[in-house]
Image (spheres, grey):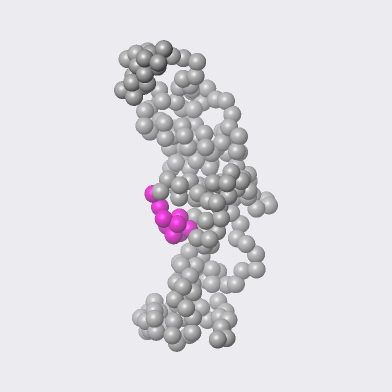
Amino acid sequence: MFKRKYEAADKHAILEEVSSGEIGFLAAVKKYEINKTTLMKWQRRYKLYGYEGLESRTHNRSYSAELKLQAVQDYLEGKLSKYQIIDKYKIASTTQLSNWIKKYNGHSSLKAYKGEAKAMTKGRSTTWQERIDIVQYCLTHQHNYQQTALHFQVSYQQVYQWVKKFEAGGQDALKDSRGRKKAPEELTEAEHQKLEMKKLEY
């Protein structure tokens, strides 16, 4: 069957017809010979981008490396669905998000399009006070890990981990424990058991 190509103005008129209640969703699908997925896609794109979202694009929408990383992190944390994430970050489709997730899990870098700022992927050494300052800055800026990483020239992952540690255990959780043995009273129950197991092994 020949598929009619709808211009932005046509799509907008159909969406207005449906939203005003003049015609039902399924009736519109039948009347204009489009499938349900297509009409749903038009509705979502119109909600996200307005009239511009209904226009045929000849080039890819530009996304920064930081936005891609944030979207992937949100998905991996399991708090939001793919549809909620593409709505949150105004991503064109779930397919695009899936590609980013695949790249991330395959340890490929999530590069920005030309002209966009790149995320710092390698971390750097910091002092305890620096880590406290970085976390405070991030919390003051509504958990904006991307902005914080760029501001302090550290990696997104470092900021993310420090904030999580701080929220779980306060400033002391940000201390670098390498090279220092914990006092017995500082050990957790699990660490006590681990220590006992080592003693038994010896």
Q: Residue at x 56, y 80 (%)?
A: 6
- Secondary structure mostly seen in the magenta stretch: helix
Which x, y percent locates residue 40?
Answer: 45, 72
Q: Residue at x 45, y 47 (%)?
A: 76
Q: Nearer the viewer, residue 10 or 192?
A: 192
Is residue 76 part of the magenta span, yes or no? no
In this rendering, is residue 104 above or below 95? Answer: above
Which x, y percent locates residue 2?
Answer: 57, 86
Which quadrant of the figure has residue 163?
Answer: top left
Which x, y percent locates residue 130?
Answer: 51, 26
Can the viewer see residue 188? no
Which quadrant of the figure has residue 23?
Answer: bottom left
Q: Nearer the viewer, residue 175 or 143?
A: 175
Can the viewer see residue 96? yes
For this orientation, the residue located farthest to the front is 201
Q: Is residue 45 left or right of residue 193?
A: right
Which x, y percent locates residue 10?
Answer: 52, 81
In this rendering, is residue 39 above or below 147? Answer: below
The number of discs equals: 0
Q: Is residue 181 left or right of residue 114?
A: left
Magenta span of residues: 79-87
Q: Residue at x 49, y 19 (%)?
A: 178
Q: Residue at x 63, y 50 (%)?
A: 112
